[in-house]
Amino acid sequence: MQLLDGKALSAKIEKTVADEVKILKSKTGSVPGLAVILVGQDPASAAYVSMKKKACDRVGFYSVTHEMPEDISQDAIEKTITMMNDNPNIDGILIQLPLPSQIDTTKILELVNPSKDVDGFHPYNVGRLTTGLEGFVPCTPLGVMELLDEYNIDVKGKNCVVVGASNIVGKPMASLLLNANATVEICHIFTDDLKRHTLNADMIFVGAGVINLIKDDMVKDGAVIIDIGINRADNGKLVGDVDFEKVSKKCSYITPVPGGVGPMTIAMLLSNTLKAAQAHADERE
């Protein structure tokens, strides 16, 4: 069994991004700019935003966080997004999800300019991903594909089971795998007999938010396990959706939690924002 080390690869990607930022700055005088909207006091969301801010600082991005109260109005968020769409110093706009119940999340995501949609959630970019065209891809599944590529793990022709069908992870993960010529099956909360599906899988990608959902008797020998889940156990420890201790004895490759997919998500956010900045710089020339 070999660990897929997202921490090491993300550091490598950060170094590349930082070098590209210096080149962009010397050519255009500007650096990539990322704006984040954070609503409310959710500790997990605040922690993610803090990590993203630190990553931006490390690679030389300009970044700004718009912190808004839990009871913010739809109109107030929309005005902020419109302002950021019009701001030439902002190349990427990130809406930290989830948003409070009074906010129409779909409308908010659709308001972001697709050329600044570095999270890949706008229907324009979702459509381009589904049809195999160039665009912004959600950071977590994109990070998974980078990790597989780093370890020369080819998905072509492999039986891949994606557990979880969210718009943020499961669906785009399935699209990326399909685009890379894998045979893809999506399982979710209404799937009957999950084990029957996972036992046939060459590769399992799980992001369901359920501790120990994937057990060793659900995995065939030599399978590749990508654990996208992140949960806090009763003892306060961060764990994934896979029973790591037992499953790791059967599989060929596995991502640890933490240190696997998590760091790759932030690395891909930096990569997407750099890509947006480079495209915007080309347009201005």
Image (cartoon, rainbow, N blue to C red):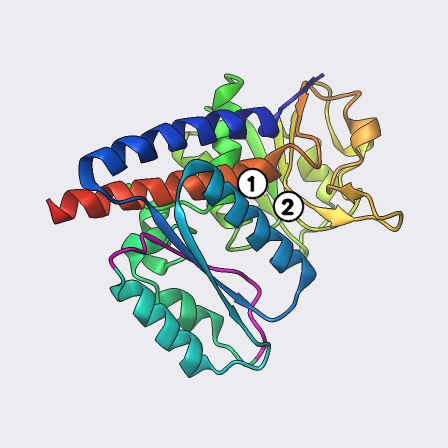
For label 1, the residue is: 185
Q: Amino acid under label 2?
A: Gly
Assign the magenta stretch its main secondary structure: loop
Coordinates of residue 207 in the picture (x, y in percent): 64, 45
Measured Cα–Cα span from mark 1 to mark 2 = 14 Å
Question: Is residue 90 rendered to the left or right of residue 183?
Answer: left
Coordinates of residue 215 in the picture (x, y in percent): 80, 36
Coordinates of residue 114 in the picture (x, y in percent): 30, 57
Q: Quadrant of the C terminus?
A: top left
Question: Is residue 124 rendered to the left or right of residue 29?
Answer: right
> Which one is nearer the viewer's eye here, 64 or 131?
64
Label 2: state its secondary structure.
Answer: loop
Task: Give the residue at x 39% y 32%.
Answer: 18
Residue 142 visible in this rendered orientation of the protein:
yes
Coordinates of residue 205 in the picture (x, y in percent): 61, 37
Q: Quadrant of the N terminus?
A: top right
Instruction: Please identify the quarter of the rendering in which residue 243 is found.
Output: top right
Q: Amino acid under label 1?
A: Glu
Label 2 crowd (10 A; few <14 / some 14-19 / many >=20): many
Magenta segment: 88-101
Residue 165 visible in this rendered orientation of the protein:
no
Instruction: Please identify the quarter of the rendering in which residue 108 is found.
Output: bottom left
> Which one is nearer the viewer's eye here, 95 or 132?
95
Task: Give the residue at x 38% y 75%.
Answer: 78
Instruction: Identify whether 254 is placed above or below 58.
Output: above
For label 2, the residue is: 207
Question: Is residue 71 rendered to the left or right of residue 82?
Answer: right
Nearest to N terminus: mark 1 or mark 2: 1
Q: Are marks 1 and 2 in contact (CB under 8 Å)?
A: no
Task: Give the residue at x 53% y 25%.
Answer: 9
Q: Which mark is residue 248?
A: none
> Which one is nearer the viewer's eye here, 256 or 201?
256
